[in-house]
Amino acid sequence: MRIVIAGGGVIGCSIAWHVQKAGGEAILLERGEIAGEATGASAGMLIAPIEDTGNRAFNVLRRASLEMFPALIEEIEEASGIDVEYKKPGMIRTARSQKAARQLHKAAKNNPELEWVEPRALRELEPSLTRDIAGATFSEGDADLNPGRLANAFAVAAERAGAEVLRRTMFTGVKKDGRRIDGVVTNTGTVSDIDAIVLAAGPWTEALTTRLGARLPSPAMRGQMIAYRSKSLRHAIWGEDGYLVPKPRGYVWAGATVEDVGFRKKTTARGLAGLRRMAGDLVPRLRKAKVASSWAGLRPGSPDGLPVIGRFPGKQNVFLATGHFRNGVLLAPITGALVADLVLNGRTDRRLSPFSPMRFCR
Ligand SMILES: Cc1cc2nc3c(=O)[nH]c(=O)nc-3n(C[C@H](O)[C@H](O)[C@H](O)COP(=O)(O)OP(=O)(O)OC[C@H]3O[C@@H](n4cnc5c(N)ncnc54)[C@H](O)[C@@H]3O)c2cc1C
């Protein structure tokens, strides 16, 4: 089966790899470079769903995806020859106020993955952390990786297995509209005799859906980040206003803002000042560290903040995979595997049902 995937972020690339691996023929269209948008801007943290987000189905999906990583990384690094810089530094969750500390303490009591850390032990665990902390927990299950490398590893592995990866190729429409679509139009030509299309174009997916006759909102949610030149951290730190992640080659990344400002991708003085304040409050040494770079990306949102994965309304062979918002890197393995199964075998895994696009079409 020939499957066109529009969008070469981590979601589209994972789908392409999983389609190819399952015996399909993936044709991946990316209008720019692989991982050139939200994926390349991401912090790449794989955070275990231990906090109560209030949505059980979402936590089940996140947990299942997190558990896929170790085996998948091995497979994808071997198949692509790309090191995705996967590591498990563990995460320290911190609370500055007594109220937040009580909540963390309660969470640690109820969750075996969270270990409550006394102040003296905290100083040994992460010496450069501020002393102004009312409470902290440690969890060793949290991992992180380089998301741009992960997306490229999926794309290269898919390509080596026979997929077509068309970079600088933009999906512009379909050949002949109807309930079933058998060809797509791009800025460089047409792709004919296809069996299905998956729209995985991040926040630009909405524009593509309107071309297919049903508008499914995928708002862009800007996130700004800073990279410090610093070796001051051993673990990822989660604070009440943001997070810090140690990265290879002597960097610490600080993130991230969450802003609903449409497709404006530039960093702002205000956004970066907020991140610097947060970083300096958590690790005072960072106040003097050199800022190596800063950037922003547009996360794909959705009206209820949850992923939008499944069949496109009114079309037999069009599918959607977007709306991953703050968890797209974490959710890439499960999204790729379950969308490939849906598209190639027509099976909707029950874990996907709560995320069907149909929930916006009533
Ligand atoms: C600052 C920041 C920090 C983040 N941190 C984390 C984190 O720690 N952990 C985590 O799990 N997630 C994180 N995220 C979220 C994560 O990055 C996203 O959820 C994920 O990258 C979304 O992937 P995607 O493939 O859906 O979208 P994108 O990466 O945006 O990819 C969509 C692609 O589609 C292409 N495209 C658009 N229109 C067309 C067209 N017509 N034809 C062809 N191609 C097209 C675009 O060029 C783009 O490359 C973060 C995001 C940001 C911005």
Image (spheres, rainbow, N blue to C red):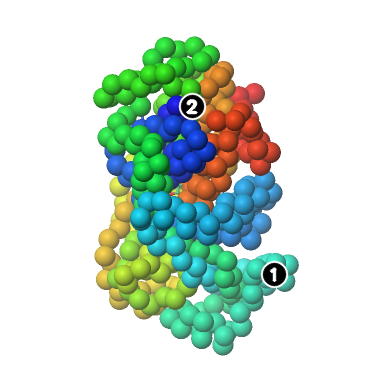
Q: Residues within 10 Å of mark 1 (few under 14, many from 20)?
A: few
Rounded to the nearest angstrom, the CA distance separating label 2 from label 1 is: 45 Å
Q: Do the CB atoms of the residues marked 2 and 1 lie less than 8 Å apart?
A: no
Ligand 1 position by quadrant: top left
Which residue is at the front of the view, 200 or 240? 200
| 284 relative to 4, above or below | below
Q: Depth-wise, is mark 2 or mark 1 nearer the camera?
A: 2
Determine the residue positioned at 56% across, 87% down.
Answer: 120
Residue 246, how many percent across, how many down? 40, 69
| The C terminus sits in image quarter | top right
Residue 271, how many percent across, how many down? 37, 55
Residue 349, how many percent across, how many down? 65, 38
Where, by quadrant of the figure, is residue 44 drawn?
bottom left
Q: Residues within 10 Å of mark 2 (few under 14, many from 20)?
A: some
Which residue is at the front of the view, 192 or 33? 192
Note whether residue 36 is visible: yes
Query: On the rendered structure, is 271 left or right of 20?
Result: left
Task: Look at mark 2 in the image and give the residue it sits on.
Answer: 1
Which residue is at the front of the view, 15 or 228? 15
Determine the residue positioned at 48% across, 80% down.
Answer: 126
Note whether residue 256 is visible: no
Determine the residue positioned at 32% across, 29% down.
Answer: 170
Task: Look at mark 1 in the image and give the residue it sits on.
Answer: 112
Sequence-earlier tag: 2 or 1: 2
Amino acid under disc 2: Met
Query: On the rendered structure, is 245 left or right of 68?
Result: left
Q: For mark 1, give the secondary structure.
A: loop
| 115 relative to 81, above or below | below
